Amino acid sequence: MPSPLLSRRLLLRSALGAGALGLGLAACGEGTATSLPASAPADLTGVTIRAMVNQPHVLAFTQLLAPAFEREFGGKLETTAVPYDQLTSQQILDVQGGAGQFDVFDYFYFGLGALVDAGALVDLTDQLAATDTSDYLPSVYDAYTLLDGRRYGVPFDGDVHVLYYNRAVFETYGLAPPATWDEYDGAARTITERSGGSVYGAVVEGQQVPMILGCSFINRLAGYGGALVGPDGGPTLTSDAAQAALQHLIDVNPYALPTPLQIGFDQANSAFLSGQAAMLDTWTDLGLKAQDPASSKIVDRWGVVPLPVGGSNTEHRTALNAGFGLGVSTAAADPAKAAAFITWATDPARNLLLASTTGSGIDPARRSTLESPDYAKVSAPATAVITAGLEGSPLVWPKDKDAPRLLQDLVDQLALAIAGTQTPQQSLANAQASWERALA
């Protein structure tokens, strides 16, 4: 088992200070590979693979990948799940702390730079150059795996957000699904007020971590035509779009499920699927749950639209919100076998299986999945909206070595503004200053 989980903030500090610990790759044990040459895939017969994975991906590994791996190769997949707010830090600690218990990391793409800076991921550039990767979606392939011209993994979970709405509630109050954030506000207000609070107009995910509040802010930032950084690589967190995005999160509070800053992934999904809230911008696998009578009270009573636009922007755009790749730990017992495993685990058959299974938490990362009638059957009526988002030009999060810290700095400042203890302008100015210092 890995070392006991530390507090989120201690882990975050540990991860981001990893480069200063002076622990070289030799601490992982003799024979540790930092890169793999181009070669035929290693034989996986009878192999045991140990994977550290994101908590919401447990079903994908334990109930889908593990049985298939055993059937096909007689191999064993051992899975250890870590909460999403500690994932990158725990992966770095496993390598730099000398435990070296894992072969494969299910990693946040915005943590890629921190992992590489800490010497935690094997360079797979040459290995992948000899592999057909043309089926991976262009919108996620480079974003999830490429850093400074080198490639460190393969796409696993093609995460974007769309806006889900309760069609029955909207019909009750004579509302159309929102195309703009102003229309979203109007619908949220109407539903909350006219229902007497029996149904909240929206549920806003505001838990103070990048994967939750960060996504909610970035969805609105993209909708208002903004970005986290400009063409020159400098932060743009005080732009008009950023100001509008944060103000929107503040203004929707009275009409959203209480209390947004305490709402995480599970609470948000539960509120929407139970009919307690009428709108939720979130990951695309929610549609599978919404059509599953075992987890949903709104079967056949929901709809989905692209994320709204705002201000002068008229182009609907989603964001690559907290997507995942699979990489090989530099502490892997056999890096070549671990590399063969991640290629197998993300192949077309596996991606289709995982993206089409309720509760897996995995969304399409391949063209063949998006184009599959089997995927369309389970993802309808969201298929066209999901396809448009992933085949478009989604907003990509930073992924340099400081990205996890800077994204946490940003959501800490956003939370202060949402809580009313700091003005939106001051919060964004503070975040801008933090990013400028790091990116200078």
Image (cartoon, rainbow, N blue to C red):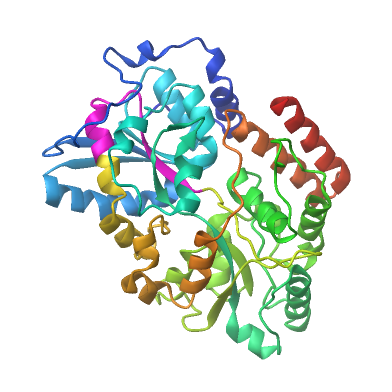
**Where is residue 215 shown, x and y percent of the image?**
62, 52
Residue range (magenta) = 323-340
Residue 255 horizontal side relative to residue 362, left or right: right
409 lies left or right of 394: right
Q: Is residue 325 magenta?
A: yes
User: For this rendering, which residue is in front, 272 or 70?
Assistant: 70
Left or right of residue 272, residue 4 in this image: left
Residue 382 in percent (x, y) is at 49, 73
Q: Position of residue 148 (x, y in %)?
A: 51, 29
Q: Quadrant of residue 342?
A: top left
Quick one: quadrant of the N terminus?
top left
Q: Is residue 21 magenta?
A: no
Residue positioned 68% across, 68% down in the render: 308
Q: Residue 399 vs residue 232: left or right?
A: left
- For the residue pair 61 and 260, the one nearer the viewer reads as 61
> Residue 250, position in %: x, y?
80, 57
Q: Nearer the viewer, residue 14 or 336?
A: 336
Residue at image coords 77%, 37%: 431
Residue drawn at (70%, 48%) of the image? 227
Closer to the camera in the image, 196 or 340? 340
